[in-house]
Amino acid sequence: MKFQSPRGATVVVRRDEYLFSVALGRVVRLDVVLPPGFSVRAAEPYPVLYLNDGQDLARLHLPATLNRLFRRQEVRPFVLVAIHAADRLQEYGVAARPDYLGRGSRAGRYTDFMLKELLPYVQAHYHASAEAGEAAVAGMSLGGLMAFDLAWHHPEAFLKAGVFSGSFWWRGRGLADGYTDADRLMHSLVRARPASPGQQFWLQTGTDDETSDRNHNGIIDAIDDTLDLLHTLAAQGLPAAAARYVEVPGGHHHPDTWGTILPDFLRWAFGTKELVAPDVAASEPRPARWRLGGERSRGARTAQRN
């Protein structure tokens, strides 16, 4: 799809919008980023990206990145809704159950907020599409786990998810209590149902996300857990072309890395057809894997997980 941004126009950032959530029992703070030339009277509703941990909008350099992508016509006009986090350790996780320490106990309520309150609000106020194929959800770390859980279990709302350094280690049993990889909650939930038609996932890790290596195979857990999830998705029927895996050599568990790789995700999610052709044929057994050059290293940053 071709479009022409108004000459000299830039994104409009509407900061500090507040929405009371009955599901969460609190006020949720939002920043909404509108594309150049945005109009509520546009002929077609806008695609939309819902971003967890929206308080990091500036640290991710998102407005500047969007201005560049829109100016170069590398992505379609879309609305970005940045959702500020509150109690991340309770509101992010998987909706089905808390982890072994009781964390993520309000992830089900956060899911209700997203589906029953935020999406209708954004669709009503910002001419955002209600089509699942035009809606993406994304996040970093625990926010990425939450984004994946939302998209996996609610393809009627989101058919695309972007996960930056996702917390796929989230588990139902502690390491000192007989843990095995079967205790990883998201992997178990993916094994419980087949992939839905049209689902697509963009997953990123950095080789310096952490130093933890549970199985002592020389590969950090962040990469192992993400690759295992990709293999599980394939086993559940997700076509290889529907998954894009981005491994960033030297990439850290930090907004600096995520902001650097964000353009790839945005082109994947909202780019024009000629810019987002699949990396591999759908018949290939492995998901698309793109790296920024360099060799895999063991990393120099540790996530505190217990």
Image: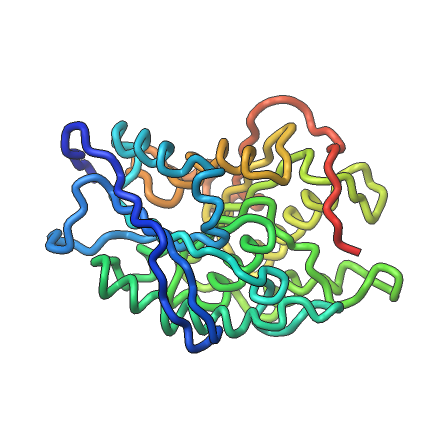
Q: Name the residue: 39% across, 40% down.
A: 266
**Which residue is nearer to you in this view: 13 or 146?**
13
Residue 304 x, y percent position in the rendering: 75, 50
Residue 121 x, y percent position in the rendering: 29, 67
Q: Name the image colouring.
A: rainbow
Task: Classify residue 92 by image quadrant.
Answer: bottom right
Residue 283 shows in this picture: no
Q: Exactly how many numbered labels are in the figure?
A: 0
Task: Classify residue 98 by image quadrant.
Answer: bottom right
Residue at the far top: name it.
294
**Which residue is nearer to you in this view: 29 or 187?**
29
Residue 3 shows in this picture: yes
Q: Name the residue: 82% across, 48% down.
A: 214
User: Is 108 above or below relative to 48?
Assistant: below
Task: Classify residue 211 by image quadrant.
Answer: top right
Q: Is residue 201 left or right of residue 34?
A: right
Q: Name the residue: 81% across, 63% down.
A: 174
Name the image quarter holding the C terminus.
bottom right
Name the image quarter holding the N terminus.
top left
Q: Name the residue: 79% across, 44% down.
A: 212
Residue 23 x, y percent position in the rendering: 46, 76
Residue 201 x, y percent position in the rendering: 48, 51
Q: Is residue 186 left or right of residue 237?
A: right
